[in-house]
C-alpha cells in the first residue's frame, strides 16, 4: 500500500490558516471529518489531544505529525497541511511548524495501513524532500512528490530489512526506538539514528517497536558484541536482555532531535550499567522463565473472571446452598441470578480466557483466537483448567510455527497473514489436536483430580493445606508462590473450595507475621523496619504476600523460614477446620464469604503469631 492510498487531494490543505497548535488540530480534524474519514470527530480529537499530552508531536525542523489510533477513525487516512507563515506548535526546537501531517489510524488498522503510515515518517527525515513540499504549488504536486519519493526509497527500504550489524572494523551501536502509538516517532528516530551513524562512520542496527510489532530485532550475540546501546522509547520495551551493558535511555523525541549526541554517548560508554530485573538476560529468561511468564499472563487475565464469578457464586450461597435451584424449597430468584451470572457467565470464560492469553503471550495477537477456541474446546470436553493450559501453549507455539512457515511467502501477502492465514490455520490445527489428541486423556486426568480433591479428608487434607500454605511463603510472589496459587484456582474450577482457602491463608501470614514481630519485638527492628511493618498489616490483610519481600531480602534465612512455618500452619489449620472459599482473592474483604469465618480468622492469626514469635526471637537486635 502506498502513502497516497491514504493521502488524497480532499485531505490536503495547501494554504493553512491556523497559526497556533489548537487551531491547527481543529482545522486538520475538520478536514478529515469533511472527507468522511471519521466515525466520531470529537472522539478522534480527544485521542489526538491525549497523544499531545504525552509529548508534543511537533518534532522540529518545521514538522508536526499529530496522530492517533482509535475506533473513532472510519478509514485509515492522512491529512496534510502546508503553512507558509508557520504554526506555533510547541515544537521541540521552539521553531514554527510548516509541514503538518495528521495521521488517523483505525483501531483495527491492519499491518499494511500501519506500515504505510510509519513509512511517511521516514520520508520526512530527508531535508531536500521537505523543501520540495514547501515549494509545491498545488495539491496534485504534493501527491506527485510523495509518490516519487516513496518509489525512490522502496529499494533502499527493502535492502535494510533485517539488516545485520556490519562486520567492518567500525564501532558498533545498537538502538531500540518506540513511541506510544508506534506510528510516527518510532520510525523517525530510527531513520535519524541510522543517517547520523552513517555520517559518523559508525555501524548501527535499530530495532523498531511499532504498531505492527518488533522489526529488525536485536539478537543476543549482537547485544554481547555491541560497543554501545541506545533505547529511545516512550513506552515499555524488553530491557532485561541489556542487563550488564551500558545503556543510554532517553525519550524517543531525542532519537529524532539528538542522534549524534546519543551515538557519541553510546560509543564513549557515557551511561549507567543497566541492572535489569534480578540481572536476568533475555536468553536466561527464555530458557528459565518463559513458560512461567506465559502462564502468568493467562492467569492474571483470567483472574477478574475468577474473582468476580467466585464472589457472585459465594453470595448466592448466602441464601442457601441450593437456593439457586428452582426445584429446591429454599429457592430464591436472586440467588439463581447471582449463580447464573457468576457460574454460567463469568466462570464459563475461565478456561478460554486462560488459553487465549497464554497463546497471545507466546505468539502476540495472532495467537489469541486459536488459544480462545482451543480453551473453549477443552472446557466443552471437561478437560478443565489443565486442558486450558495445554490449549494455550499449543495454540501459541502452533502460531509461532505458522509465522516461520509463512515468512517465506511474498511480501505482497503480508497484509492477509494476521486477518486470514494465522486465524484459519491456527484455529484449525489447534482445534484438531485438542479434539482428537488432547481432550480425551486430559478429561480423564481432570476427572481424577476432581475426585481426589473431593475425597480429601482428615490427615490428607491437612497435609495438602500445609504444603500449599508453606509454598505461598517460600518466594512470596515468585514461581513457587504462583504455582500454589494456580493450583488453588484449578481446585475452584473443579468446584473444590478448600485448597484455595489454605492458599489465601498461607499468603496472608508472611506480611502479617512480620508486622506482629515489629510490634512485639520493637527493640530488634530499626525505625524504618517498624514503619514498613505497620504497612504490612494492610498488605497482609489484603492478601499481598509481596509486602514481606523487603524483610526477606535483608534477612532471608530468618524471615523466609519463619514465614514458611507460620504459613504452613495456617494452611493446615484451614483444611483441618474444613474452611471453603469460592473467591480466589481479596483477603479479609472476602472472609464473610467463607463457610467458617471465625475459624478461618483463627487459622490466619495463629499462623501469623507463630511467624511473628519465631522471627522476633530469632532476629538479632538492630545496632
Image (spheres, rainbow, N blue to C red):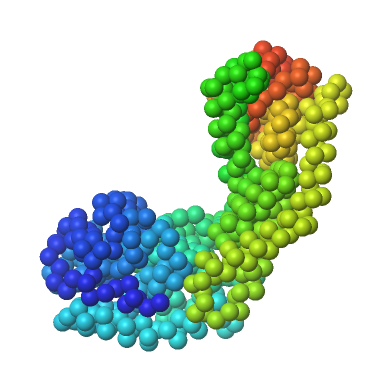
Q: Position of residue 418 (x, y in %)?
A: 53, 66
Q: Is residue 240 visible?
A: no
Question: Among all residues in the image, which is located at the extreme right?
Answer: 459
Horizontally, is 235 left or right of 31 in the view? right
Spot occupied by residue 382 in the image (x, y as percentages of width and height): 73, 43
Quadrant showing the C terminus: top right
Residue 431: which quarter of the image?
A: bottom right
Q: Is residue 464 above or below residue 121?
A: above
The quadrant of the picture occupied by the N terminus is: bottom left
Residue 480, by quadrant, is top right
Measured from the top left, where is residue 589 in percent x and y? 56, 22
Residue at 76 percent across and 19 percent down: it is 578
Q: Nearer the viewer, residue 608 or 336?
A: 336
- In terms of image quadrants, where is residue 198? bottom left
Of residues 547 and 594, the one nearer the viewer is 594
**Residue 87 screen position, x and y as percent:** 17, 64
Q: Residue at x 32, y 83 (%)?
A: 147
Above or below residue 97? Residue 590 is above
Q: Which residue shows up at 57% across the image and 22% down it?
A: 335
Would residue 436 appear left or right of 104 to someone viewing this image? right
Can you say whether 589 is above or below 102 in the image? Answer: above
Amino acid at each position: 500500500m502506498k502513502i497516497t492510498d491514504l493521502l488524497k487531494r480532499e485531505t490536503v490543505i495547501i494554504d493553512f490558516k491556523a497559526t497556533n497548535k489548537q487551531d491547527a488540530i481543529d482545522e486538520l480534524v475538520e478536514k478529515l471529518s469533511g472527507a468522511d474519514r471519521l466515525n466520531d470527530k470529537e472522539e478522534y480529537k480527544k485521542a489526538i489531544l491525549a497523544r499531545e499530552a504525552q509529548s508534543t508531536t511537533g518534532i522540529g525542523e518545521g514538522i508536526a505529525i499529530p496522530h492517533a489510533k482509535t475506533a473513532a477513525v472510519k478509514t485509515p487516512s492522512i491529512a496534510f497541511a502546508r503553512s507558509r507563515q508557520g504554526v506555533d506548535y510547541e515544537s521541540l526546537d521552539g521553531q514554527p511548524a510548516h509541514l503538518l501531517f495528521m495521521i488517523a489510524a483505525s483501531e483495527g488498522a491492519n499491518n499494511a495501513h500501519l506500515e504505510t503510515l510509519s513509512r511517511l515518517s521516514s520520508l520526512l527525515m530527508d531535508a531536500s524532500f521537505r523543501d520540495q513540499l514547501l515549494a509545491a504549488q498545488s495539491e496534485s504536486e504534493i501527491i506527485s512528490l510523495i509518490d516519487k519519493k516513496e518509489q525512490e526509497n522502496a529499494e533502499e527500504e527493502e535492502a535494510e530489512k533485517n539488516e545485520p550489524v556490519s562486520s567492518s572494523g567500525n564501532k558498533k551501536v545498537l538502538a531500540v526506538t518506540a513511541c506510544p502509538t508506534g506510528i510516527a516517532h518510532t520510525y523517525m528516530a530510527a531513520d535519524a539514528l541510522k543517517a547520523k551513524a552513517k555520517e559518523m562512520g559508525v555501524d548501527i542496527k535499530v530495532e523498531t517497536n511499532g504498531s505492527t510489532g518488533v522489526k529488525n530485532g536485536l539478537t543476543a550475540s549482537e547485544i554481547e558484541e555491541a560497543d554501545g546501546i541506545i533505547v529511545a522509547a516512550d513506552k515499555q520495551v524488553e530491557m532485561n536482555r541489556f542487563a550488564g551493558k551500558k545503556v543510554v535511555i532517553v525519550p524517543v523525541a531525542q532519537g529524532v532531535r539528538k542522534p549524534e549526541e546519543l551515538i557519541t554517548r553510546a560509543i564513549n560508554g557515557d551511561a549507567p550499567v543497566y541492572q535489569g530485573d534480578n540481572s536476568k538476560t533475555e536468553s536466561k529468561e527464555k530458557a528459565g522463565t518463559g513458560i512461567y511468564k506465559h502462564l502468568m499472563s493467562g492467569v492474571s487475565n483470567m483472574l477478574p473472571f475468577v474473582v468476580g464469578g467466585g464472589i457472585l457464586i459465594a453470595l448466592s450461597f448466602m441464601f442457601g446452598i441450593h437456593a439457586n435451584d428452582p426445584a429446591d424449597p429454599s429457592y430464591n430468584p436472586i440467588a439463581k441470578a447471582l449463580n447464573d451470572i457468576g457460574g454460567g457467565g463469568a466462570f464459563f470464560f475461565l478456561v478460554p480466557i486462560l488459553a487465549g492469553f497464554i497463546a497471545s503471550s507466546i505468539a502476540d495477537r495472532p495467537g489469541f483466537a486459536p488459544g480462545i477456541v482451543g480453551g473453549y474446546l477443552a472446557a466443552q470436553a471437561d478437560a478443565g483448567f489443565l486442558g486450558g493450559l495445554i490449549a494455550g501453549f499449543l495454540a501459541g507455539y502452533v502460531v509461532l510455527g505458522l509465522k516461520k512457515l509463512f515468512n517465506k511467502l511474498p511480501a505482497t501477502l503480508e497484509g492477509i497473514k494476521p486477518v486470514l492465514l494465522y486465524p484459519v490455520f491456527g484455529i484449525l490445527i489447534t482445534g484438531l489436536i485438542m479434539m482428537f489428541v488432547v481432550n480425551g486423556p486430559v478429561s480423564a486426568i481432570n476427572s481424577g483430580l476432581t475426585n481426589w480433591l473431593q475425597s480429601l479428608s482428615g490427615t490428607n487434607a491437612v497435609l495438602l493445606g500445609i504444603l500449599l500454605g508453606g509454598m505461598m511463603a517460600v518466594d512470596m510472589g515468585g514461581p513457587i508462590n504462583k504455582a500454589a496459587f494456580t493450583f488453588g484456582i484449578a481446585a475452584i474450577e473443579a468446584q473444590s473450595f478448600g485448597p484455595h482457602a489454605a492458599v489465601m491463608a498461607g499468603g496472608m501470614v508472611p506480611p502479617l507475621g512480620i508486622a506482629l514481630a515489629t510490634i512485639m519485638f520493637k527493640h530488634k527492628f530499626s525505625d524504618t523496619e517498624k514503619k514498613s511493618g505497620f504497612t504490612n498489616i494492610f498488605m497482609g490483610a489484603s492478601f499481598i504476600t509481596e509486602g514481606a519481600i523487603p524483610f526477606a531480602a535483608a534477612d532471608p534465612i530468618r524471615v523466609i523460614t519463619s514465614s514458611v512455618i507460620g504459613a504452613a500452619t495456617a494452611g493446615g489449620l484451614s483444611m483441618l477446620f474444613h474452611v471453603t472459599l469460592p473467591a480466589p482473592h481479596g483477603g479479609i474483604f472476602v472472609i464473610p464469604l467463607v463457610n467458617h469465618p471465625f475459624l478461618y480468622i483463627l487459622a490466619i492469626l495463629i499462623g501469623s503469631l507463630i511467624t511473628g514469635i519465631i522471627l522476633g526471637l530469632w532476629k538479632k537486635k538492630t545496632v
